[in-house]
Image (tube, grey):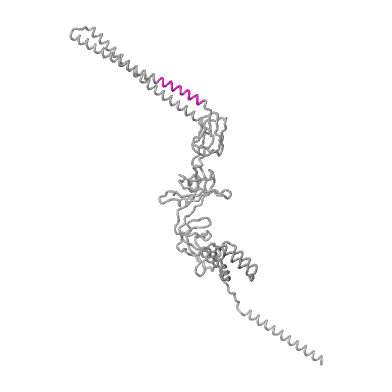
Amino acid sequence: MRFLRHSLTGLFLIAVTLGLLVFAVANVRDAVVARMSDEPRMPTARERVFSVNLVQAQLETITPIMTVFGEVQSRRTLEIRAASGGTIVELAEGFEDGARVTAGQVLARINPANAQSALDRATNDLADAEVAARDARSAVEIARDTLTSLQEQADLRQRAYERQVDLADRGVGSASAVETAELAAASARQAVLSARNALAQAETRVDTAANALNRARIAQAEAQRDLDDTVIRAEFDGTLSETNAVQGGLVSANEQLTQLVDDNALEVAFRVSTSQYARLLNEDGELLQAPVTVTLDVSGIALASEGTITRDSAAVAEGQTGRLIFARLDTARGLKPGDFVTVLVTEPPLERVARLPATAVDAAETVLAINAEERLEVLPVTLMRRQGDDVLVRSPIIEGREIVAQRSPLLGAGIKVRPLRTGPQAEAATPSLVELTPERREKLKAFVNGNTRLPSDVKTRILTQLDADRVPAAMVERIESRMGG
């Protein structure tokens, strides 16, 4: 009986196993048939959303700033040279590079011995010329008196001759007396002619003496200038540069001793492109007297100076482009000729333009704006200026619109975005902050410290916020509401 019971149990288990196996095979076959007969199902694609930073475009009047580079130079630079050769017998104290001098200050003296001797000779020659001039004037007076006396004698001889002729006509005089009187009158007239010739020669001597006197005076003045040129003075206030003279040294005529630079008359020369130059012209085509700011960055310390544009170059140099513009500096604290500086030129203001990040505008001069459905759309703009990392654009359709600040190849028209706003809208979303009086702050901190139900980390965070200068208003209101105050 036991064997029969075990055999029946084994047959039952085998039957159940075979049934389950057949059921499993049938299910697998049905699943394979259904899988192969069904159409493939594609998963539903989900739209990709990009996060973008937004800025709001506001049209306003903005004054552009043109940034260029230039070189500081002096409007007055004088090369001080020796007018005459000789030995330097005296140099001014501190005759060296960088020394400050004033107008009229004696810088150097050249040995004046030769120039003094030449002046003495010229003075003596002038004295001789003055003596000769006086002698010539005296000779003229004597010749004039002699001519007067001889003229009187000639008149007497002529009247005597006329009297003899009258006597001869009346038969009283003789022919020999008439002839003698006539010869005497002719001799007197000849003497008058000789006196006139002597007077003319004396007058010529006066002119010759006057010319000689003038030449002597010119020679004396030239000798005096040569003597004065041995003293070298500063023509204006300034600073010495490139000094190469030493006391006792021998210099030749026209040799350069130093340079005098007027560091109070500085200007900056900078080159701009033709398009930038056109923006600095007024309606009449004349250069604007625009203000400029010159900055020299020295180890993080900026030396700045204000100035005004005064003129531009008359012609474009060979191998150069654009225009060379000069601006006079009002104050040049710390600046020196030769400094390479940054020049900020204030252009005429632009009306109805918006300031946007440079990354918001593409090469086609378009921007991406977000609409009410938080999708992007392309708006055309006109690029007016580039201002560092920003640009100034003009377009009437971007007034008040939110513009994508940073464009990327993934962004385009119709794309769904998640806006990340900056500016006034973002500030409105941030919690407001308030300033606490010391009494109010201590009262709040005492309440927080006395609250035993707060975890230690939360209590530390709240106390840290309460120690700040400005505390979130919502937190203050929440604590005071629990305090009952």
Q: Residue at x 22, y 11 (%)?
A: 163
Pick the residue in front: 341 or 107. Answer: 107
Quarter in which the N terminus is drawn: bottom right
The picture quadrant where one finds residue 151 is: top left
Is residue 326 at all visible to an observer of this figure? no
Q: Height in image: 204 above or below 451?
A: above
* Residue 346, image x, y percentages: 47, 52
The image shows residue 478, relative to residue 204, as above or below, that is below
Camera-nearest residue between 317 and 25: 317
- Where residue 476 appears, as percent x and y from the top left, is 57, 67
Query: Does residue 19 appear anywhere in the picture?
Result: yes
Image: magenta residue range: 114-132
Is residue 125 located in the magenta-colored stretch of the structure? Answer: yes
Q: Reply yes or no: does residue 313 show up in magenta.
A: no
Please tell me which residue is depicted at 27% across the width and 10% down the height of the picture: 184
In the image, residue 137 lies at what x, y percent? 37, 20
Image position, residue 321 (x, y; %): 49, 48
SS assignment for the magenta stretch, majority: helix
Position of the C terminus, as image quadrant, is bottom right
